[in-house]
Image (cartoon, grey):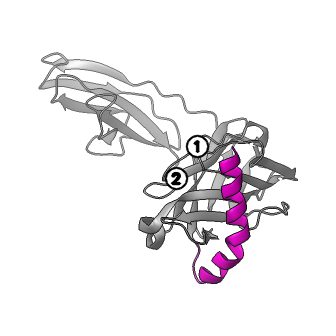
């Protein structure tokens, strides 16, 4: 733990030099996703926030070392972010160097943490900063945004990334893509059940199957397949998508196959 504290102290002290060197570019880009971009009143989804070192610095960066951001919810009357259930799955979560922030109206300010125990954090791939459950409250739309952290005097920069071989840290966050919209409607949840009926040659290779389901009003439906639940390719849409008729005939070309139907808003 003493080694970690020393590293953080050095980064904070040298940030003034790093800012002078990195003033023309931000070191880390921030992005966001929602498990579902549209939910019903009383429904739920999860907001995910990610960070990655910008392409021009990745090959020379060891990892993102620390981060410090605010999460904004522009319309808390439409959707409520459950900050108390916030998860930071890959951060260190050391009580001395992390905080889940403080609520201010529908926003959460001063969230920070470190990646001292995660080699390569945010270099080759984006790293998840946090996930936050969100619940639909009323019909309408809200926008979630991330910005540089505020309200914590000891944090000197929103992002610090350590260069390979040492030296002043790369600093600063790019928030151009750090926003996402959520729509809350009064429609009932869409419950789908896909049924498979053998038409010819059973369910084995070259066998014909009819896949049927009851479509949900106002939704776009896609029937998807994969050869194995753990395969690299993952779920792929069957030809002819969207499949809004609720029925599709397929020829099974493998020894086994898995199918599902997915509904989305137009």
Q: Is residue 118 visible from the viewing direction of this image?
A: yes
Question: Disc 1 on helix, strand or loop?
Answer: loop
Q: Quadrant of residue 148?
A: bottom right
Q: Quadrant of residue 167?
A: bottom right
Q: Where the N terminus falls, by quadrant?
A: top right
Residue drawn where x is 53% and y is 28% of the image: 191
The foreground one among 233 and 65 is 65
Residue drawn where x is 53% and y is 39% of the image: 217
Residue drawn where x is 40% and y is 28% of the image: 213
Q: Extreme right residue here?
A: 105
Q: Which residue is mark 2?
A: 121
Q: Tell me how far mark 1 sits from mark 2, CA to CA.
A: 9 Å
Mark 1 or 2 closer to N-term? 1
Q: Quadrant of residue 12?
A: bottom right
Question: Disc 2 on helix, strand or loop?
Answer: loop
The crowding category of the residue bearing disc 1, from other C-alpha atoms within 10 Å (few below 14, some 14 to 19, many at least 20), is some
Q: Magenta segment: does it hold 13?
A: yes
- Say which mark, if any, is on residue 90: 1
Q: Principal SS element in the magenta part?
A: helix
Whether 174 is drawn above or below 187: the answer is below
Q: Position of residue 225 (x, y in %)?
A: 30, 34
| Magenta residues, start to end | 1-26
Q: Is residue 137 visible from the viewing direction of this image?
A: no
The foreground one among 103 and 56 is 56
Whether 117 is drawn above or below 230: the answer is below
Whether 142 is drawn above or below 196: the answer is below
Q: Position of residue 208 (x, y in %)?
A: 17, 25
Q: Magenta segment: does it hold 56?
A: no
Are the two marked residues, 1 and 2, in contact with CB atoms closer than 8 angstroms?
yes
């Amino acid at each position: 733990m003493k080694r970690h504290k020393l590293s953080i102290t050095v980064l904070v002290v040298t940030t003034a030099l790093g800012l002078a060197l990195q003033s023309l570019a931000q070191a880390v880009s921030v992005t966001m996703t929602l498990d579902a971009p549209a939910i019903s009143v009383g429904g739920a989804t999860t907001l995910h926030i990610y960070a990655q070192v910008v392409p021009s610095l990745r090959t020379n960066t060891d990892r993102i070392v620390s981060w410090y951001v605010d999460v904004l919810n522009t319309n808390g009357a439409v959707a409520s972010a459950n900050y108390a259930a916030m998860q930071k799955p890959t951060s260190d979560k050391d009580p001395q160097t992390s905080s889940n922030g403080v609520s201010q109206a529908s926003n959460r300010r001063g969230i920070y943490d470190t990646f001292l125990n995660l080699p390569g954090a945010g270099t080759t791939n984006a790293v998840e900063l946090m996930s936050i459950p969100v619940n639909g409250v009323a019909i309408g739309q809200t926008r979630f945004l991330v910005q540089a952290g505020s309200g914590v005097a000891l944090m000197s920069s929103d992002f610090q990334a350590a260069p390979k071989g040492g030296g002043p840290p790369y600093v600063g966050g790019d928030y151009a893509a750090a926003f996402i919209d959520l729509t809350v409607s009064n429609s009932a949840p869409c419950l789908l059940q896909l049924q498979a009926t053998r038409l010819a040659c059973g369910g084995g290779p070259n066998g014909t199957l009819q896949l049927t389901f009851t479509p949900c009003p106002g939704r776009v439906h896609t029937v998807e397949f994969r050869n194995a639940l753990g395969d690299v390719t993952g779920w792929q849409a069957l030809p002819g998508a969207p499949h809004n008729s609720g029925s599709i005939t397929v020829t099974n070309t493998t020894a086994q196959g898995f199918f599902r139907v997915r509904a989305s808003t137009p």
